Amino acid sequence: MSDQHVYRADLRIDVDAIRHNVRVLAGRAADSGARTMVIVKSDGYGHGALTVARAALEAGADRLGVAALGEALQLREGGITAPVLCWLFTEGDEFGPAIAADIELSASSQATLARIVAAATAQDRVARVHLKIDTGLARSGCPADLWPALVEAAAKAEAAGRIRVEAVWSHLACADEPGHPSIDMQAERFARAYEQARAAGLDPIRHLANSAAVLTRPDLHFELVRPGIAVYGLDPVPQAGDHDLRPAMTFRSSVSLTKRVPAGESVSYGHSWTARKATNLALVPVGYADGVPRSLSGRMDVWLAGRRRPVRGRVCMDQLVVDCGDDEVREGDEVIVFGPGDRGEPTAAEWADELGTIHYEIVTGMFRPRVTRTVVNSEAEGT
């Protein structure tokens, strides 16, 4: 598809940036002797799970990870044959189709393990299992006092030929705050849990490091790392230096109407902004239904005609208004709502800082029914 187009609301996904980021992260892991599992949950953090999965595997990732069974099965249906881990289940989830598709499953309790064993038995197959220990995040993961019983049950199921325990794993709560005391505390708890698994007769690999730990804690890389947000070029620890990550998502639109208004004219609902002097306004057909937070009203810029320009008045459901001063802009001119920041345009991280949230929330919330997604893949086009 040509990239020269007038867009209403479009996410431009730079696959070359994703490959670059995976090479950076997988290189860090390889320096520690670890392999790389790229996390593509939530439709690849809004970037397109299949697109990201293929690019990540091409760039050196060994495995993929998702939260929901449906996400895992969609990867298989899309032709992905690499190992895929899935870890977040409901009582109604059926493990049979996942086991048949060779999806690796996480167990945080004996009850979940028993369901996996039953599904594997029904199919006369061996299920691949990752045992998760709660080391201090207090979400999923087995509590420490129940862990010995879980690893004993897993060892029995493995001896019976119903499962293969691939890994012991956990998740860090504060890895994006380098030096936080909880990181070492969790690492110590994880080490104890791993030794208990070994004492039960299991021989699993270990994975603990998320994006932040991949970048700042090589001692926690173990045999496998699990980068997520950094794959998409968004740095979880910018305070720790430049990590050579390239944001892969650009949100763009086009000018749909221009007009000049006199001094004293107010803009948008509630007349929260009034022009002090005559100015040119550009109407951009994106709003909070397309992922632009209404709470950014009066607090955001866009990139238009070679410079940042302020959005005036309230962000509406379908549109926003840009103040262009005395500069002339034309209908059809491209508007970058956020992008990598290379030219000085706003970024997803900037939005997150302004809103008091994290850039994860921004990018995962961008793909909406009216928003298209355009994949730009110059490496593939050049081969």
Image: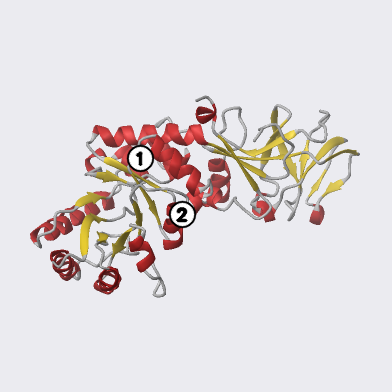
Residue 85 falls in image quadrant? bottom left
In this view, the residue farthest toward the top is: 382
Q: Is residue 312 shown left or right of residue 44?
A: right
**For the residue labelled by badge 1, is the local secondary structure a helix, a strand or a loop?**
loop
Front residue of 267 and 76: 76
Q: Residue 14 vs residue 255: left or right?
A: left
Question: On the picture, is 348 further left or further right than 167?
Answer: right
Front one among 364 and 113: 113
Q: Which amino acid does label 2 sit on?
A: Glu
Question: What label sits on residue 77 in the rendered view?
Answer: 2
Q: Answer with mark 2 or mark 1, whichever residue precedes in sequence.
A: 1
- The residue depicted at 30 percent of the width and 61 percent of the height is 106
What amino acid is at disc 1?
Answer: Ala
Marks 2 and 1, how far apart at CA: 19 Å
Within 10 angstroms of label 2, few (less than 14), some, or many (20 or more) residues? few
Task: Give the percent coordinates (x, y) of residue 76.
Answer: 42, 53
Residue 174 lies, in percent from the top left, at 34, 51
Please give the name of the residue rendered at 57% of the width and 28% of the height, measured from the top-left corner: 342
Residue sitting at 57 percent across and 50 percent down?
355
Viewer-closest of 335 and 52: 52
Q: Which residue, given by chain and number where applicable, does mark 1 sit on? A: 61
Identify whether 37 is placed above or below 89. above
Residue 94 located left or right of residue 358:
left
Image height check: is 104 above or below 32? below
Residue 122 screen position, x and y as percent: 29, 72
Asked if the residue under mark 1 is in contact with the one under mark 2, i.e. CB atoms within 8 Å, the reply is no
Is residue 105 among what the camera can see?
Answer: yes
Q: What element carries label 2?
A: helix
Res 41 seen here: no
